[in-house]
Structures are given as structure tokens and as C-alpha cells.
Amino acid sequence: GAGVSQSPSNKVTEKGKDVELRCDPISGHTALYWYRQRLGQGLEFLIYFQGNSAPDKSGLPSDRFSAERTGESVSTLTIQRTQQEDSAVYLCASSLVPGNEQFFGPGTRLTVL
Amino acid sequence: SQQGEEDPQALSIQEGENATMNCSYKTSINNLQWYRQNSGRGLVHLILIRSNEREKHSGRLRVTLDTSKKSSSLLITASRAADTASYFCATDYNDYKLSFGAGTTVTVRA
């Protein structure tokens, strides 16, 4: 596809359940990023992949959050035992190489009831 | 914090007027990127300006960077209703992590 795609676009879950969010970066982009945007706020960095490795996981809020990337392509962000404060829009971005323009997907809006 | 801070928080202008918003940051950066966001979704990349650049243009957009003052500005000329959106600056100081401010909400009145 031409741009970054994410699925699902919306996810409603109950507190305590696990969720998986998917990101398909632009083909050929080596770097992939996850961010979170809470209502009315700017974006918070979560994690960054260069290829399939994650040099910086410092933004992950807790050990309930994890992410992986396979085949230097698709990435999944997993949130275990979701809490209400996890409700946010989760945005994925990719860039050709680190330090270049980051292009964002449409996001997944997660609502934890 | 490396976070960029936009100013003003909100801006309301008449169609056809120019809109200027500013971004200040705290430490040295590799590049600074401006984004537009409509209705809380879909961040659209506008311009990337590197630390060794002072000005860049893209259509009706003009971005300046003053590294001595640690500030950047985004100018939208001849604004249109479709420019109504939130605008964010994002600073990149390590070539991967973007730090975003809270944004400037621009409303263009017809």
C-alpha cells in the first residue's frame, strides 16, 4: 500500500483483557515507531524498531506493554490486562531510515471500559 | 524534557489571512518536523527541517528554524477553510524519537 496502515481502526475492550494492535509500515521503510495520544494531548513515544530489533523501549508505560516486529515489516503492539488509563489512540509511523520524515498511520482508537 | 511547545494554543483567523505559530524546544536537535492533524486522527507530515537549515518552503507553508533561540515557526499563507486543524511541531534529537508538543488549534473562518 501507499501509506502506513493500522488495524483495527477502533477497539473496545473490557478492563483486564489483552489486546493486539497491528501496524503495516510503508514498504521498504526500515524504521518503525509506536506512539500514544491521549485525548487532547500531544503524542507520547512508546517504542522504536530498526529492522526487527528495538533499540529503545523506554517509552513503554509498564511491563503490560510489549511490541514485536517481524520480517522488517509488520509490527504488533500488545497490551496485557488492559486498564482504563490505556484508553487512547495508538499511532504507528515509519521512516525510510532513522532521522528521516516519519509518516503516520490513521491510528487505532482503544477504549477500555 | 525535549518536548517542543507550540504557541499560541489556539488561533482563529479569517480566510485569506496568514497564520503563524511558533515552537520552542529545550535542547539541541537533529531535525524538527511539523504535522497537521484533523479531527483527532490522521497526522499528516508537512515539513522536515534539519538543524543546519534555516528556512524551508512547501506550497503555502514556510518553516523557519533558529537553533540559537531553539525555536521554529510555521507560516501558512492565504489560509483556507481546509487549513482548519491542529498543528504540531515534533523535535528529533536522537534520529528516531519525536517529542511532540500539545499543538496549536487553528480555525479558519469563512
Image (cartoon, rainbow, N blue to C red):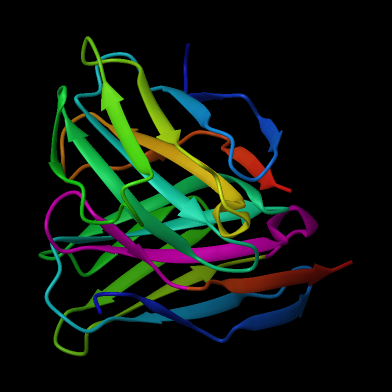
Which is nearer the eye, B110 or A79?
A79
Does A13 appear in magenta? no
Name above or below for residue A36 compared with residue A42: above
Q: Is residue A5 visible?
A: yes
Which is nearer the eye, A61 or A6?
A61
Count of marks overlaid on the render: 0
Residue A22 picture location, percent across and down = 47, 23
Give the residue at x 75% y 52%.
B82
Residue B5 picture location, percent across and down = 41, 81
Name above or below for residue B100 compared with residue A24: below
Residue range in magenta is B79-101
Give the residue at x 68% y 60%.
B85
Q: Is residue B108 left or right of residue B5?
A: right
Can you name the residue that lies furthest to the bottom here?
A: B69
Which is nearer the eye, A36 or B51?
A36
Name above or below for residue A52 compared with residue B4: above
Residue B77 picture location, percent across and down = 59, 67
Q: Is residue B42 left or right of residue B62?
A: right
Q: Is residue A4 visible?
A: no
Q: Is residue B89 left or right of residue B78?
A: left
Give the residue at x 27% y 26%.
A68
Give the residue at x 16% y 80%.
B67
Which is nearer the eye, A26 or B74?
A26
Q: Is residue A77 left or right of residue A7?
A: left
Q: Quadrant of the C terminus of chain B?
A: bottom right
The image quadrant of residue B14 is: bottom right
Does B100 appear in magenta? yes
The image quadrant of residue B36 is: bottom right
Residue A49 picture location, percent across and down = 20, 34
Name above or below for residue B74 compared with residue B60: below
Q: Quadrant of the N terminus of chain B?
A: bottom left
